Amino acid sequence: MALAFVNGRYLPQAQAWVHAEDRGFQFADGVYEVVALLDGHLMDFDAHMDRLARSLEALRLSWPMSRAALALVMRELIRRNGVTTGLIYLQITRGSAPRDFKFPAPSVRPTLVMTVRRVTRFGSPTHIAEGVPIITIPDIRWLRRDIKSVSLLPQVLGKQQAVEAGAFEAWMVDADGLVTEGCSSNAWIVSADGVLITRPTNHLILSGVTRGSLLQLAAEFGIATEIRPFSVAEAKAAPEAFLSSATTFALPVTRIDGQPVGTGRPGAITLRLRQAYLATVGGVRS
Ligand code: PDD
């Protein structure tokens, strides 16, 4: 039976409720993290906790418990669920109070919810071998995309549009035709001369933890990198493209809006980075 952690208690998920007036529910007044668990190892754990700290600070939310205690509870929930490979989801909201836009009284405690899901792989064998199709859509989001906010409606709509178009992900595009990021991933291309290109992190995209690790690996391999935005046209003409997230790691993108990327096969740099991420961050020996 799947167990969730809700405000201090480990509960069967079917009984794991939050209050009807929770501010996460009413205002999306909360933040979240998703961390991959691979063979018992929490991938990039410290970097996820660092980003959680930044998200909490941006919302002027306090930690529901100390960072060290939170790490312990996360591991305990994983243990109680008997999961060794999967995803842990953590959400913190400003708590429950009668609906009113301004912050509630300081006595209102944040809500903390955690769930664990078993997954067998981070990207299916077909997705890794063939790459995935993506579509491009306008980026209609707010301007604090650096906060890992639970306000994800544009991404929900975007992802649904992708699925209905037979695609795996939608890359969002700004008014200048530049790709910002995927609905739940960061976007990358490789240029004809083998330079890895991805957008700088600022308020316009989420600073992906996987992105950060992949950039470090690229530096270790001596892969030339340019941190700059790229256009949809540039991506369509690139020999290689991929996306990255905690749920997919580095995953090849082989079609954009129906057009093949390069030869239409996953690129060598993408697969090398994916392998290196598994080997170094995940400790998986290839
Ligand atoms: N999403 N950009 C956006 C908008 C995201 O939602 C995510 C992750 C990323 C990649 O970040 P990271 O490498 O830290 O996972 C980029 C998670 C997986 C989700 O919402 O399920």
Image (cartoon, rainbow, N blue to C red):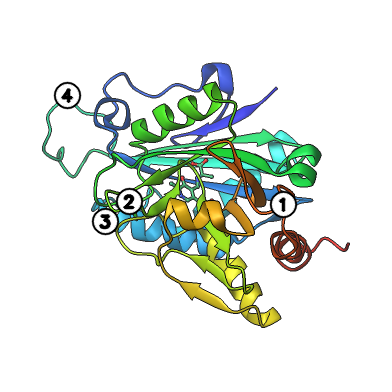
In-image side of 198 versus 30 (left or right): right
Q: Label 2, on which residue? A: 145
Foreground tag (2 vs 3): 2
Question: Does ligand 1 reach within 8 Å of label 2's beta carbon?
Answer: yes
Residue 263 shows which numbered tag? 1
Q: Label 4, on which residue? A: 98
Residue 58 shows which numbered tag? 3
Q: Quadrant of the C terminus?
A: bottom right
Q: Secondary structure at mark 1?
A: loop
* Of callouts 1 and 2, the N-terminal one: 2
In-image side of 134 versus 205 (left or right): right
Question: What residue is rendered at 65% in x and 73% in y?
Answer: 217
Q: Amino acid at mark 4?
A: Pro
Q: Secondary structure at mark 3?
A: helix
In-image side of 196 versus 150 (left or right): right
Q: Are marks 4 and 3 in contact (CB under 8 Å)?
A: no
* Of callouts 4 and 1, the N-terminal one: 4
Q: Amino acid at mark 1?
A: Thr
Q: Secondary structure at mark 4?
A: loop
